[in-house]
Image: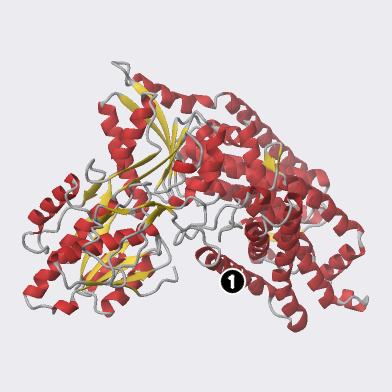
């Protein structure tokens, strides 16, 4: 009995091994087939195929940060197809900011990518370990900042002037607040904004300061409270922080974090809200006024096209409304203050033309004094900026010396409720 | 009459199965895993041969792939070696995760603040020793409570994991943070990075040496014998005059020290920095490795390489055939399930109702 069973097992085993052995030879056919079909689509004209790797910290389910990259990816694929360039995407989802990121970069490099895009700040140090081994491949670290002094020709940084979008969202919020004051719904002192921030990180500080300045430009009595949650994405903590801010008397909520919970918390408390990365009107139709996001397809188009044509492209790229890299999500006309759309168009044009500087030093003070000096770059690696004066011509110039934001000043009117993060 | 009371399937312990048969069952279970995985690939609309080919090619096909596979296997093997003596003693140390992290913290302290004060090789040695001591001390805490007051080591070691991971999160955002607000500790100075041998950080040499050392320690030393006796029966050990509490603490310190050394290897060799996910679940996966290898250090080498191949292969699968990452996890799960499950059939036999003959036979 036992022997029979044993034999049967052996037989089954031998069959499987045989099958597996056969399989070894035919491995390449399915994956190879796809590439061929990709090429065959564009025989007409100057059809080119670029293999682009994309490493993401999340996936489309976050409906925020990574989802916004996916939108950029899809948009650029269409745009470039119109130009006769086929993009063959190789995407790695849910990669951690650790050595698995290094492995993902190696994996994509070995898979033959011409260009590899890392979508999160913490990916850069791991990308930099791989980049020297593949000088013919271009590496991009979005939102990070080492390329200008890492000594490598094939590394790139990119960001967008999201503070411009923040400023505009602030204008929308400020107009709403001013309308509430004018209607007698709140007093001038009660115009308090609550801001849910991820960490006390330059990108976040720059964003909420721009937002506050936008609001203040149309509602002079506004003040702001900032609550940090200590995570880029923690739905329940973000909701709790927004709730705490509403309890503390904030009537307008905004956020620099990935989830929609601050929007729903604002709606539940009868407050208003402006969002980030994604249109949040569908989750909070009575609260969400507008949102702002980066349109990554603008940069992707620029970089991928350069690679397709074998051209060099900037190692440090940062544009905003001038190139359409920062866009506003639809305005919620039902609840926004009257005349918001017109005002928005006007301010947007001023920013685009350079007439209006977001960080105009005449519009804010630091400990009662105007800001007269602030360095932009850290050259000696101690994480304290020591070179390139960013304050000149009456304004602080954000993202002028490197794409990643460097505004970290605490201005008057903004109260940090916690700074542990 | 009697038949109706017999359940359809009964289990009976079996002992002394011939070696050939044991291996046949293991082989068969491995093949069963391949078969089930193939079915999953088919359901997902992929050619299973192509899929397996991609996995093997992606993990072992190229020198770069092999290097990455080895890199995944190193901490698995090291940690399996670390927990082996504890499990032999039937002390359920599921705190390797925290001990690895503690070791990484100890090593990182010297990497961050002593890199310019110590000469290169000396720095690495100090880091390794610091890692081992920190991991050992972290493991000693639950061992002390177990020895003194008989606390439950399973819960205790598990909880210690979260404390240590919390400590690293605090370090990341607080005293050791690099760029303000970034939550990222700067990359180590190059002097604090383990040198590469054959393209992989030399941690692989360290764990291979440890493998041999652990084999001898468990098999041929007095301490190894004491561990085995306690594992069989604490009372016997006591009757033989062994100080059980002391041996528990000593063994746990050793276990934690090896895990701490793994923490040093990962932080210095692979990540070149410290972050809260430094252990990356290795502390738990290593339990599977240790069990599958039946606590035999040499078998652990094979098992950890196998898991690394699955891991790396699944990764390639995701890139090349755009199989979702969750499918890769399912495949790994199927392999582990089949391989662990087959041990059941080695230890027990199924007796079907009416299988009288068979019972009589054995």
Chain where mark 1 sits: B
Q: Nearer the viewer, residue A4 or A412?
A: A412
| Quarter of the image with the C terminus of chain B in it | bottom right
Above or below, comparing residue A49 to residue A221 in the picture: above
Identify the element where label 1 is drawn.
helix
Q: Is residue B117 left or right of residue A204?
A: right
For the image, the number of numbered tags is 1
Q: Is residue B186 left or right of residue B355?
A: left
Q: Position of residue B160 (x, y in %)?
A: 63, 71
Could you tell me which residue is drawn at 87 percent across and 63 percent down? B224
Q: Nearer the viewer, residue A331 or B9?
A: A331
Instruction: Give neighbour class at mark 1: few <14, some 14-19, many 20+ (Cα, 10 Å).
Output: few
Could you tell me which residue is drawn at 28 percent across and 72 percent down? A368
Q: Position of residue A76 (x, y in %)?
A: 30, 36
Q: Nearer the viewer, residue B78 or A224?
A: A224
Above or below, comparing residue A188 to residue A292 in the picture: below
Could you tell me which residue is drawn at 19 percent across and 72 percent down? A222
Q: Position of residue A87 (x, y in %)?
A: 36, 30
Q: Position of residue A12 (x, y in %)?
A: 66, 36
| Quarter of the image with the N terminus of chain B in it | bottom right
- Residue B126 visible in the shown view: yes
What residue sits right under mark 1 in the picture?
B163
Quadrant hosting residue B131:
bottom right
């Amino acid at each position: 009995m036992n022997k029979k069973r044993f034999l049967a097992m052996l037989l089954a085993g031998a069959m499987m091994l045989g099958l597996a052995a056969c399989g070894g030879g035919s491995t390449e056919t399915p994956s190879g087939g796809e590439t061929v079909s990709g090429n065959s689509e564009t025989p007409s004209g100057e059809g080119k195929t670029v293999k682009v790797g994309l490493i993401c910290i999340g996936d489309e389910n976050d409906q925020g940060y990574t989802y916004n990259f996916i939108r950029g990816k899809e948009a650029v694929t269409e745009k470039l197809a119109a130009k006769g360039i086929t993009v063959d995407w190789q995407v790695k989802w849910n990669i951690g900011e650790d050595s698995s990121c290094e492995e993902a970069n190696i994996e994509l490099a070995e898979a033959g990518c011409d260009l590899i895009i890392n979508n999160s700040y913490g990916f850069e140090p791991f990308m930099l370990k791989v980049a020297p081994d593949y000088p013919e491949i271009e590496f991009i670290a979005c939102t990070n900042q080492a390329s200008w002094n890492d000594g490598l020709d094939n590394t790139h940084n990119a960001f967008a002037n999201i503070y411009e979008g923040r400023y505009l969202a602030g204008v929308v919020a400020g107009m709403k607040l001013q309308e509430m004051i004018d209607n007698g719904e709140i007093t001038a002192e009660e115009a308090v904004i609550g801001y849910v921030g991820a960490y006390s990180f330059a990108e976040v500080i720059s964003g909420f300061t721009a937002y506050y300045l936008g609001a203040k430009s149309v509602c002079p009595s506004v003040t702001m409270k900032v609550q940090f949650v200590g995570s880029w994405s923690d739905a329940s903590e973000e909701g709790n922080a927004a709730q705490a801010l509403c309890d503390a008397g904030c009537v307008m909520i905004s956020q620099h974090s990935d989830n929609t919970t601050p929007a729903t918390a604002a709606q539940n408390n009868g407050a208003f809200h402006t969002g980030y990365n994604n249109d949040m009107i569908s989750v909070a139709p009575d609260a969400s006024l507008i949102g702002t996001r980066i349109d990554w397809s603008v940069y992707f188009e620029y970089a991928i096209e350069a690679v397709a044509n074998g051209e060099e492209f900037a190692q440090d790229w940062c544009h905003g409304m001038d190139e359409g890299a920062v866009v506003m999500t639809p305005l919620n006309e039902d609840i926004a203050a009257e005349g918001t759309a017109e005002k928005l168009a006007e301010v947007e044009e001023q920013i685009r033309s350079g007439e209006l500087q977001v960080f105009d030093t005449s519009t804010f003070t630091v400990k009662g004094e105007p800001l007269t000096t602030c360095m932009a770059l850290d050259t000696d690696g101690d994480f304290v900026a020591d070179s390139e004066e960013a304050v000149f011509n009456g304004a602080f110039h954000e993202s002028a010396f490197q794409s990643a934001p460097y505004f970290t000043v605490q201005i008057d009117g903004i109260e940090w409720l916690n700074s542990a993060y | 009459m009697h038949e109706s009371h017999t359940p359809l399937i009964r289990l009976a312990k079996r002992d002394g199965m011939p070696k050939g048969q044991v291996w046949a069952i293991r082989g068969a279970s491995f093949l069963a895993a391949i078969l089930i995985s193939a079915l999953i690939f088919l359901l997902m609309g992929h050619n299973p041969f192509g899929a397996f080919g991609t996995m093997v090619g992606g993990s072992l096909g190229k020198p770069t792939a092999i290097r990455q596979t080895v890199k995944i296997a190193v901490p698995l093997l090291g940690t399996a070696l670390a927990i082996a003596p504890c499990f032999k003693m039937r002390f359920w140390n599921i705190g390797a995760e925290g001990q690895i992290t503690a070791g990484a913290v100890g090593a990182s302290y010297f990497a961050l603040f002593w890199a310019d004060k110590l000469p290169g090789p000396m720095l690495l040695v100090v880091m390794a020793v610091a890692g081992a001591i920190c991991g050992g001390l972290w493991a000693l805490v639950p061992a002390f409570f177990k020895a003194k007051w008989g606390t439950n080591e399973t819960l205790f070691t598990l909880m210690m994991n979260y404390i240590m991971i919390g400590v690293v999160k605090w370090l990341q955002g607080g005293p050791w943070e690099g760029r303000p607000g970034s939550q990222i500790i700067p990359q180590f100075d190059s002097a604090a990075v383990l040198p590469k041998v054959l393209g992989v950080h030399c941690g692989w040499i360290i764990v291979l040496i440890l493998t041999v050392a652990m084999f001898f320690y468990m098999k041929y030393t007095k301490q190894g014998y004491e561990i085995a006796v306690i594992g069989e029966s604490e009372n016997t050990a006591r009757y033989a005059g062994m100080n059980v509490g002391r041996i528990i603490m000593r063994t746990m310190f050793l276990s934690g020290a090896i895990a701490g050394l793994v923490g040093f290897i990962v932080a210095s060799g692979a990540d070149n920095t410290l972050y809260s996910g430094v252990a990356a679940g290795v502390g738990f996966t290593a339990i599977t490795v240790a069990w599958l290898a039946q606590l035999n250090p040499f078998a652990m080498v094979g098992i950890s390489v196998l898991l690394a191949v699955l891991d790396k292969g699944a990764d390639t699968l995701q890139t090349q055939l755009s199989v979702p990452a969750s499918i890769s996890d399912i495949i790994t799960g199927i392999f582990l399930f089949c391989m662990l499950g087959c041990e059941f059939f080695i230890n027990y036999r199924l007796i079907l109702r009416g299988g009288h003959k068979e019972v009589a036979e054995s």
